Amino acid sequence: MSNLQRVMMKSRLPPMCPNPRFPKPSDRGFRRQTDYNPLMWDGFFAEKKDIDTNQGKFRVYLSAPSEPDAPLLVLLHGGGFSALSWAHFSSEVTKLIHCQCLAFDIRGHGDTYTEEEDDLSAERLATDVGDVIQALYGEFAPPIILMGHSMGGAICVHTAIMQVLPTLIGVVVIDVVEGTALEALASMQSFLRSRPSTFKSIQHAIEWCVRSGQVRNVESARISMPGQIINMETKKLATNELPLTPEDTSKEKLEFKHPNAIAEDAEATSSCTNDDEAKLSQAAAQVNLRKYAWRIDLSKSEKYWQGWFSGLSQKFLDIHVPKLLLLAGIDNLDRALTVGQMQGKFQLQVLARCGHAVHEDRPHEVAEVLATYLIRNKFAQPTADGQFLKHMPAC
């Protein structure tokens, strides 16, 4: 029999049965489950502090000190997020260059508690940045690079324009552009209503964060999501309940349903006994138990949204220090920024295939982009082990 005949015969045979002694990894009992247990802040930062200002107490996270003249990266998170959204990025960038990272919870977010918590105007938030740096360093602040994501990026621009940081040497804005942001405001309330308002555990909140696409990197979600929710009973941030007990971290597989979904158990209970119905009702009550809610109700900040983003492009171009704009897609550029980029007024870098939380989805690549920007402008020096891919400015 020729080889061709053997191949033709084999193609007509039914598929071979799998060897029962070697079950596939996807078989029940062998499927790898995603770990949604939260991570602690001290795995990424060296220190946390509560900084007192005349407005209240600001929670600050610091990486380990670097060389004496190394720059300070002041990291501002987006609306609804917390300082812990910078955890993975801070860990990565300090491996590449000599610098120190300072991330703090903006007013109304995380573990920061101030007077007039609802005042989220651009001017108030920018002033807070100056107050925190003044309280930490006084007249001896190191060279500062302001870096912000989304709302935090807009606050970076306002802070630079208001000149509240005398030692500012650079500004980095992540995935916020005036035109795109203003267009998105019309659907923002609808988006906020589509989110679940409560979660029954920290792990459920982390799983929602990943499954919804808010953060595509599971490891980032595990550290950042607890900083966005509070225990509804104690009114304390979920990070204050960490580390969890072994009992809390060994829960069975989590299952999510839309918070407004109707339980489809009418048919199942129709033939049940009274005892069975009682047990099902008790189990349903346990499933529906909600313990955590969002730290901040972003829908109430709507009156400040226009102030964050209106005129942002021109303000960004008017800043007189080297600037970097990091986007998740080139289509996000508006006309003013397109012209400014062609004139060389700022450096543009695009990281595709990631979501809005660019620094959480791809922290190592964002760290490489920032390290390239700082070294190119002679703001920082690479570490001894700081071998990394240098990113050329994109257009």
Image (spheres, grey):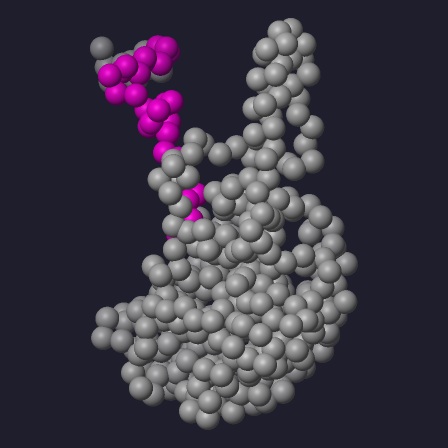
Res 156 quadrant in image? bottom right
User: In this orientation, which residue lies closer to the viewer: 392 or 57?
Assistant: 57
Residue 372 placement, left or right of 135: left
Tell me what residue is drawn at x 41 percent, y 39 percent. Answer: 248
Q: Position of residue 58 (x, y in %)?
A: 52, 72
Tell me what residue is drawn at x 59 percent, y 35 percent. Answer: 289
Q: Position of residue 81 (x, y in %)?
A: 56, 60
Q: Is residue 13 magenta?
A: yes
User: In this orientation, which residue lies closer to the viewer: 257 or 176?
Assistant: 257
Residue range of the region highlighted in magenta in the rendering: 12-39
Tell me what residue is drawn at x 62 percent, y 86 percent. Answer: 161
Q: Is residue 244 visible?
A: yes
Vertical order, 211 against 380 (above or below): above
Tell me what residue is drawn at x 44 percent, y 58 percent. Answer: 362
* Quarter of the image with the N terminus in it: top left
* Total residue callouts: 0
Q: Position of residue 344 (x, y in %)?
A: 55, 83
Q: Given the current orientation, which residue lies at the most extreme front position?
A: 234
Q: Is residue 220 magenta?
A: no
